[in-house]
Amino acid sequence: MTEEYYIGQIFIDDYPSDVATFCNSDDKCHIEEIEPENGHRRFQIVETIQPAPTREEIKQQRKQYRETHIDDETAERSRCMANGTWTAEDEQAYLALDAEVTAWIEENLPYPEEE
């Protein structure tokens, strides 16, 4: 039977080897030695705090999302406009897509001052 582990759990003197496996499985926690008590070493599962992404990392993520979700349509728009085949309906659809992509970016990848 596999024991269930959780953040905050404390072990006395030693900890089972599968605790390390548990902690390494998603990088959300790690094991730390904490203050001894009654002459016994103690170890605790502690949440790993991930640093917030930098403004540059967020900028890159935003750029990548936009490239993935609208760049092909932007190129197609430019080609069609140059050929005179871009219609008002095409423009409405493109602007709707652009608004959708922009809204997703603003909601999911905000710069720190936008939060």
Image (cartoon, rainbow, N blue to C red):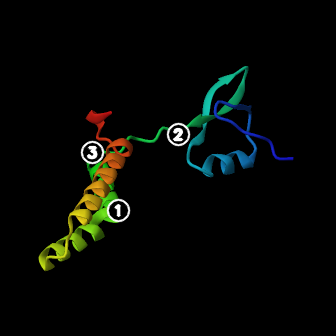
The label number, if any, that marks residue 69 in the structure image: 1
**What's the residue at 36%, 42% (across, down)?**
107
Query: In terms of depth relative to the viewer, which is nearer, 47 or 20?
Result: 47
Q: In the picture provided, is 51 more to the left or to the right than 73? A: right
Q: Is residue 60 visible?
A: no
Which of the two discs, 2 and 3, labels the residue nearer the N terminus? 2
- What amino acid type is highlighted by mark number 2? Thr
Determine the secondary structure under disc 1. helix
Q: CA distance from mark 2 to mark 1?
A: 32 Å
The label number, if any, that marks residue 80 in the structure image: none
Residue 114 image point, x, y percent: 28, 35
Q: In the picture provided, is 63 more to the left or to the right than 4? A: left
Q: CA distance from mark 1 to mark 3?
A: 21 Å
> Which residue is labeled 3 in the image?
55
> Which residue is labeled 2 in the image?
48
- What amino acid type is highlighted by mark number 1? His
Q: Residues within 10 Å of mark 3 (few under 14, many from 20)?
A: few
Which of the two discs, 2 and 1, labels the residue nearer the N terminus? 2
Q: Is residue 33 visible?
A: yes
Query: In terms of depth relative to the viewer, which is nearer, 21 or 102?
Result: 102
Give residue 112's quadrant in the image: top left
Q: In the picture provided, is 10 more to the left or to the right than 64? A: right
Which of the two discs, 1 and 3, labels the residue nearer the N terminus? 3
Mark nearer the viewer, 2 or 1 = 1
Q: Quadrant of the C terminus?
A: top left
Residue 83 image point, x, y percent: 14, 79
